[in-house]
Amino acid sequence: MLPTPVMMLLRLGIVLFLLGAGMLYSVRASKLTPGGALTGGLLGALIYLGGGFGGLSMLAAFFLLGSAASGWHLAEKRRLGLAEENKGRRTAGQVVANAGVAALAGLCGWLLPAQAALFQLLLAGSFAAATADTLASELGNVYGRRYYNVLTLRPDTRGLNGVISLEGTLCGVAGSVLIAGLYSLSVGWGREFGWLVLAGTVGNLTDSVLGATLERQHRLSNNAVNFLNTLVGGLVAGLWYWAVNAGL
């Protein structure tokens, strides 16, 4: 077995290589702006500090699934005016909006190792919500058959803030399931799996409610709504941790 310092250097080298490769690919493939790629690399480092390779796997899954979903049936989305701005290249602000909560949880987990388990769960909950929201909106706009306002449940216009579909919501749940699975592979299988699926779904629905209210009223930007979505997902996951440790 390699000495501990050598193992640490080896892991650091692997992490730097993975983050560097991801940053380079994201820019060359026009997935992120240069500023977005640099921000993503910095946030990825923080996620690794508290979440290890399991945290990086969730970041990679969110990024790859989100990019694939955004590019799926892109010509149709453009024809209908539903494609993302800036040709789908995410900016630094969008990166922070989707991964900032996870990075903050990673940093806290590193600084407070006695509470590492809590912050790992918060990290996973935030990614479950971010992934659910992205898949629900991007794939829902393609496969949805009927679209409803999340507040009134009355028919509404596809693509508007706060409009959901059954098909899109189910795609969002599938995204939460994937993130919950990656967390469980890293930490261990237990009831946290189901709670993370719930956390992702609650975060996704929160995003829709905020979109139907404050975002439509131009009181919140899309980035702010996405950040709050991931924050809610993380807090719901943290609520599970608190309840279990409180013996509830």
Image (cartoon, grey):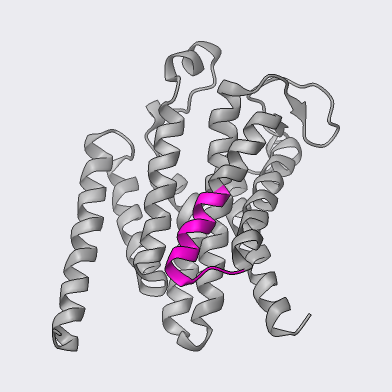
- Residue 4 versus residue 18 in the image, above or below: below
Q: State yes or no: residue 185 in magenta.
A: yes
Q: Residue furthest front?
A: 189
Q: Position of residue 188 (x, y in %)?
A: 49, 71
Q: Give the magenta-colored segment's residue range.
A: 176-190
Q: Position of residue 76 (x, y in %)?
A: 49, 14
Say which quadrant the N terminus sits in.
Answer: bottom left
Q: Nearer the viewer, residue 220 or 210?
A: 210
Q: Residue at x 53, y 30 (%)?
A: 138
Is residue 187 something that shows in the picture? Answer: yes
Q: Residue furthest top?
A: 79
Query: Which secondary structure dominates the residues rendered in magenta?
Result: helix
Q: Residue at x 62, y 54 (%)?
A: 197
- The quarter holding residue 111 reads bottom left
Taking the image as shown, residue 88 lies to the left or right of residue 2, namely right
Taking the image as shown, residue 82 lies to the left or right of residue 54, namely right
Is residue 221 something that shows in the picture? Answer: no
- Residue 35 versus residue 117 in the image, above or below: above
Taking the image as shown, residue 122 lies to the left or right of residue 44, namely right
Q: Nearer the viewer, residue 93 or 66?
A: 66
How many tags in the picture?
0
- The quarter holding residue 45 reads bottom left
Q: State yes or no: residue 83 in magenta.
A: no
Say which quadrant the C terminus sits in.
Answer: bottom right
Q: Position of residue 144 (x, y in %)?
A: 64, 23
Q: Residue at x 34, y 54 (%)?
A: 39
- The quarter holding residue 106 reads bottom left
Q: Position of residue 139 (x, y in %)?
A: 55, 29
